[in-house]
Amino acid sequence: MTTVFGGCIEPDGYELANDVIVTECSHCGGEARHSYWETCEAGSINLNESIICTVCGASEGDLDDGYFEVDEAARALEYDEYIAEFC
């Protein structure tokens, strides 16, 4: 978790959310990762989310442009490591 501080945020700081749940892909019915995370931009707390299927690769939501520049094998390994942090 990340804690942010600033004049427009809680005086004692605010802990940003970063959660992942497993859900069903709306495209193929396979297992998908639904990620929720918060960012602090110019004192504003913003909620972001993305859904990425581990079966068919369908993706939607707030994805960084760099997500689409990585090969599938590297992406799968990255997500396995990412999910391992939460399990």
Image (tube, grey):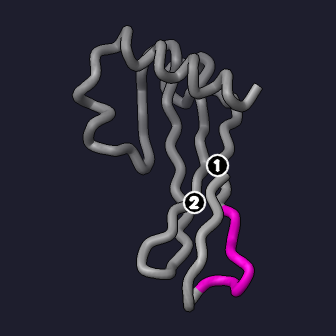
Q: Is residue 85 above or below residue 39?
A: above
The foreground one among 36 and 80 is: 80
Give the mark, 1 or 2, whose residue is nearer the N terminus. Answer: 1
- Give the side of residue 73 with respect to residue 44, left or right: left
Structural distance between the alpha carbons of marks 1 and 2: 7 Å
Q: Is residue 86 above or below residue 2?
A: above
Q: In the rendered structure, which amino acid carries the disc numbered 2? A: Glu
The picture places residue 33, in percent across and down from the top left corner, at 59, 30
Residues under numbered marks 1 and 2 in contact, where contact means CB atoms less than 8 Å apart: yes
Q: In the rendered structure, which amino acid carries the disc numbered 1? A: Asn
Q: Secondary structure at mark 1?
A: strand
Q: Is residue 15 above or below residue 72?
A: below
- Give the farthest residue toward the left: 69
Q: Quadrant of residue 15?
A: bottom right
Q: Is residue 41 above or below residue 59?
A: below
- Give the farthest residue toward the bottom: 7
The residue singled out by tag 1 in the image is 18
- The residue sitting at 69% across, 75% down in the picture is 13
The picture places residue 25, in percent across and down from the top left corner, at 57, 27
The foreground one among 5 and 24 is: 5
The label shown at residue 38 is 2
- The residue sitting at 53% across, 50% down in the picture is 49
The picture places residue 22, in percent across and down from the top left corner, at 69, 29
The picture places residue 40, in percent across and down from the top left corner, at 50, 69
**Magenta segment, which residues?**
9-15
